[in-house]
Image: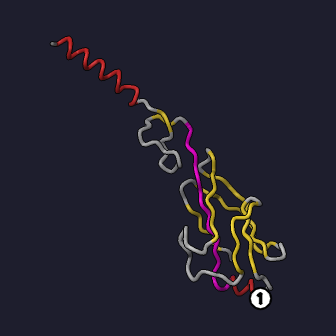
Amino acid sequence: MKKILVLSVLLLTLILLPGCKRSGCTDPDSINYDSKARTNDNSCEYEGEVLFWYNKGAADKNIAAGHTSLTFFLEGKVIGSSAANIYWGNRPECGSAGSVSTTVKLGFSKEKVYKYEIKNQNDAIVWSGNVTLTGNECLRVELL
């Protein structure tokens, strides 16, 4: 009886032991987080979100400058467009209807810098700059 108990404990230990040392992505901010992983294997991948917005004062300046439409670019790629007279009274929440936003795969970097440009209907740059996107976060950028 004692032999069976010892063998059972040994067998159970051998079965469960590999699960204790499971490797994977241990960062909960990543898109491939593995809650069962105990050892980080550097496989974590990230996404970040950016939302662009402007208030009535900026919209009035757009109209005064003759802008009728705006096209939003991130790293040279179109992410959205809007009429120049559209504005937000308060800072919008990420995912708000009518906002210009995009989610970007950051790869294995938890943080990455991207160039943005907002151009008018004549392809002239109205706003430009850099944004630093962070994994599992939404950056709300007010255009002034």
Instruction: Examine the image and state in which quarter residue 13 appears.
Output: top left
Q: Could you classify mark 1 by the number of other residues whose Cα lies within 10 Å: few (under 14), some (14-19), or many (20 or more)?
A: few
The coloring applied to the image is secondary structure
> Which amino acid, mark 1?
Ala
Q: Nearer the viewer, residue 7 or 127?
A: 7
What segment carries the magenta color? 42-58
- Examine the structure image and report whether residue 17 is included in the region drawn in magenta: no
Residue 33 percent location from the top left of the image: 49, 45
Residue 37 percent location from the top left of the image: 44, 37
Which residue is disc 1 drawn over?
A: 64
Disc 1 is placed on an element classified as helix
Q: Quadrant of the N terminus?
A: top left
Residue 42 vs 46, above or below: the answer is: above
Q: Residue at x 78, y 72 (%)?
A: 119
Residue 65 vs 122, above or below: the answer is: below
* Residue situated furthest top in the rendering: 3
Q: Which residue is drawn at 80% across and 85% down?
A: 66
- Using residue 34 as the reference point, say whether residue 114 is left or right of it: right
Residue 36 percent location from the top left of the image: 41, 39
Residue 70 vs 6, above or below: the answer is: below
